[in-house]
Image (cartoon, grey):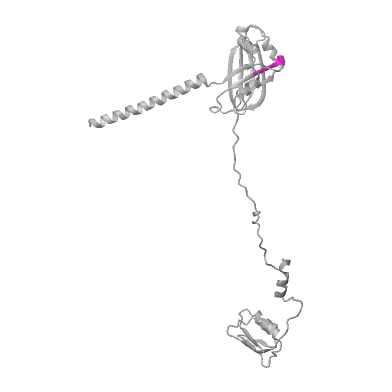
């Protein structure tokens, strides 16, 4: 019983220790992000004249993915004139650290020339329209103007220094074709009728030798077993062959002087049962 209680106590201490460690790590992570990874804005030197305002913006885009595309400046000056001024501008959406140089028009001069610098505040808001994300930065107007006039880094300098280069993905393309690779060179040629080199050999085989084959007489012609009564022989030489319902017969008194025709009938027989002897 005592052993079981001790084991349970140790297990409970281990679980509590793990929970405490996770909590401490979470707090440390949040504190680190708050101190070092918070979004930051930097006032830069504008190249757009008196109405220009340039700024650089950094944030943790892996933790907070967004495409920022708008900036708005608000002057709050309750004890002097003007009491309130708001200017805004849009720019091409940015999804990583960036700087832009914008022309805010003549209204920006109301901010630059404001009175009561120590009692007024400038609020800068950077927002992502489509992502509904925004960050606000507040500072005294005096500090804002000091940074504005002392800035010596342009937006181009900021972008070169903080450029984020995305690695282009590489895709392996499989080469496919319906055209076969050429055959290796060879001295061999096909012996076919369309090849002029062998035209003479195929002419003789086709019976077109230029002279008709000599006819011959037959001493005997007969039919072996296996006739399929296809009528091929009777169609070629009906004077010699007679096809019945069950077989084929040689007619009585059949002329045997046209051996070529009898040979043609024998070659046309699909089961090759027509036989003959030359005289």
Q: Nearer the viewer, residue 10 or 157?
A: 157
Q: Nearer the viewer, residue 63 or 82?
A: 63
Residue 174 x, y percent position in the rendering: 60, 46
| Residue range of the region highlighted in magenta in the rendering | 49-54
Q: Residue at x 48, y 21 (%)?
A: 32
Residue 51 magenta-drawn? yes
Describe residue 135's horizontal placement relative to residue 232 as left or right. Answer: left
Q: Quadrant of residue 201?
A: bottom right
Residue 160 magenta-drawn? no
Furthest residue in direction right, as rendered: 210
Q: Residue at x 61, y 15 (%)?
A: 123
Q: Nearer the viewer, residue 238 or 38?
A: 238
Q: Quadrant of the N terminus?
A: top left
Furthest residue in direction bottom, as rendered: 253
Q: Residue at x 67, y 23 (%)?
A: 90
Q: Relative to 232, is 57 above or below? A: above
Residue 122 x, y percent position in the rendering: 61, 13
Q: Quadrant of residue 243?
A: bottom right
């Amino acid at each position: 019983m005592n052993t079981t209680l001790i084991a349970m106590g140790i297990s409970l201490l281990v679980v509590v220790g793990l929970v405490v460690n996770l909590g401490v790590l979470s707090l440390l992570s949040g504190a680190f992000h708050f101190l070092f990874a918070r979004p930051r804005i930097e006032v830069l030197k504008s190249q757009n004249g008196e109405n220009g305002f340039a700024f650089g913006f950094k944030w943790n885009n892996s933790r907070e993915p967004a495409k920022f595309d708008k900036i708005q400046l608000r002057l709050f000056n309750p004890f002097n004139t003007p009491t309130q001024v708001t200017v805004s501008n849009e720019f091409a959406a940015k999804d990583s650290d960036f700087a832009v140089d914008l022309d805010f028009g003549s209204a920006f001069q109301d901010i630059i020339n404001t009175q009561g610098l120590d009692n007024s505040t400038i609020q800068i808001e950077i927002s992502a329209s489509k992502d509904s994300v925004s960050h606000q930065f507040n500072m005294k107007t005096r500090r804002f103007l000091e940074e504005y006039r002392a800035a010596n880094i342009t937006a181009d300098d900021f972008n070169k220094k903080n450029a984020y280069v995305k690695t282009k993905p590489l895709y392996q393309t499989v080469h496919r074709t319906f055209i076969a690779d050429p055959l290796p060179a060879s001295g061999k040629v096909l012996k076919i009728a369309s090849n002029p080199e062998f035209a003479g050999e195929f002419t003789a085989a086709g019976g077109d030798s230029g002279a008709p084959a000599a006819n011959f007489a037959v001493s005997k012609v007969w039919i072996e077993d296996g006739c399929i009564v296809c009528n091929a022989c009777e169609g070629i030489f009906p004077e010699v062959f007679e096809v019945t319902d069950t077989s084929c017969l040689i007619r009585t008194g059949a002329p045997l002087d046209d051996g070529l025709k009898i040979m043609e009938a024998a070659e046309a027989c699909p089961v090759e049962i027509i036989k003959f002897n030359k005289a």
